[in-house]
Image: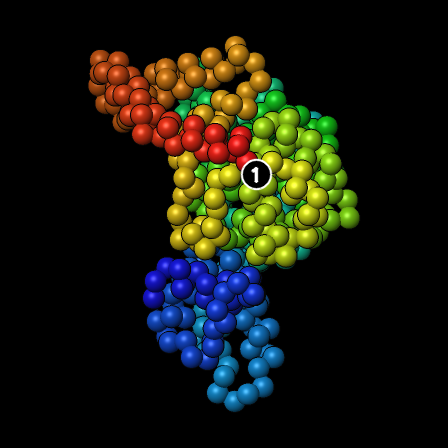
Amino acid sequence: MNKKLEGELLLYCLGIGTDKIKPARLEQLSTSEWEEIIQQSDRNGVAPLLYLRLKALDQCITIPGTTIPNSVLQRLRKKYVCNAWKNKRLYHELSKVLSLFQNDGIPVIVLKGAALAELVFQNIALRPMGDVDLIVKSKDWSKIDTILLQLGFSNVTPPLRSKRHIQWIQHIKHMSKVTLYEIHPEIYELQNHNPWLTASPATIAATDTLILGSEDFLLHLCLHIDRHLREGITKLIWWFDIAMGIKHYRKELNWDYVIQIAKKHKVEGSVHRILYVINEWFDGQVPANVLNRLKDDSIPLSFLDVLQQVPLQNREFDLFLTDISRIPSIHDKIYYGFKTFFPCREFIIQTYSVTRPNLVYFYYFIHISIIAIKAFYQLPRYLFNKYVSLRA
């Protein structure tokens, strides 16, 4: 079975975009086809959701011989139960972490999966999590490092001896026996935007904490997907995050604020692209006037291609150009460019696995050459897309 058909079958089983894809006769699927659907659901983080969906469908089927194979339901049920157990351990540990931060007067914003599973999905078994993302003010990083080390965590962040490369100041990482914690100083995709101004109180892991305001949460999820799309990486669960988030917060979402922040940070094309797909495939209930007010950047996006891990036209070099175009001041643009071409020694050593210190400067030459080659091939396409966008 080709990947496109696999993707369509998975979407059909999940009840997504049923008006856009060919209906499937589930009772006619072979064992190997079911196996591919299960594996793809697992890779996309939607196996627990698929279990509930197929279980409900199976209970509605009254025609003999058309039931969903019991072996399929049992395998998916096992994944559902395993994820529930894993997340229960994760939340138990997170409760300790948040309580200790709170006792030390450290404010925390819980991001993405850890916030979504309890508050939006309202069933921790439904939302697989690979890590826990938190926002903590950078002035508190030394405190949280001490707290987490005392809990038995390992600091797996490369040494921060220099701030001459953006990848070295995005977040710090701590690994526990349960999962990885990534601590961020801000919303990476919305730099210089203060998330604390609209942060909302919430109870997560039976502990009082904060989450992003619903509008910031939506923007963060959209831009998180968009960045990964440019790298050819995506998971279907990320799209469910947005669709279910909009449904959950629809009565309080301030769309004017979403548009204002998207335009201010020059990300309206990215936000438009994601919300358009949410409306088309997930019945996202995004008002038409919102999409009309967000400028489309004319970068094509096929949702079925997304499921096949096909990247957007613009790749890694475009990420650099897109990021630099969103920086307001000339001084900061120059600094960003400088630290991209000339990162700190530790970054070069880490990235290129340099074993002999006297070769570091040789690898600087390699690093700059790689960027130049990417620019040679990708800059014309980037400029063409910008030209098309301006003409549209």
- Left or right of 283 on screen, residue 73: left
Q: Amino acid at mark 1?
A: Asp
Q: Quick check: can you spot residue 172?
A: no
Quadrant of the drawing holding the C terminus: top right
x and y percentages locating residue 150 in the rendered image? 53, 31
How packed mark 1 is, by other alpha carbons closer than 10 Å (few <14, some 14-19, many 20 or more), is some
x and y percentages locating residue 145 in the rendered image? 53, 27
- Left or right of 367 on screen, residue 203: right
109 over 23 or under it: above or below: above
344 over 387 or under it: above or below: above
Residue depicted at x 58% and y 86%: 62
Q: Which residue is mark 1?
A: 296
Residue depicted at x 53% and y 32%: 391
Residue depicted at x 51% and y 67%: 13
Of 191 and 108, the residue lying toward us: 191
Of 376 and 99, the residue lying toward us: 376
x and y percentages locating residue 262 in the rendered image? 63, 32
Quadrant of the drawing holding the N terminus: bottom left
Residue with the most extreme bottom position = 64
Q: Quadrant of residue 375?
A: top left
Residue depicted at x 68% and y 47%: 288
x and y percentages locating residue 124 in the rendered image? 60, 55
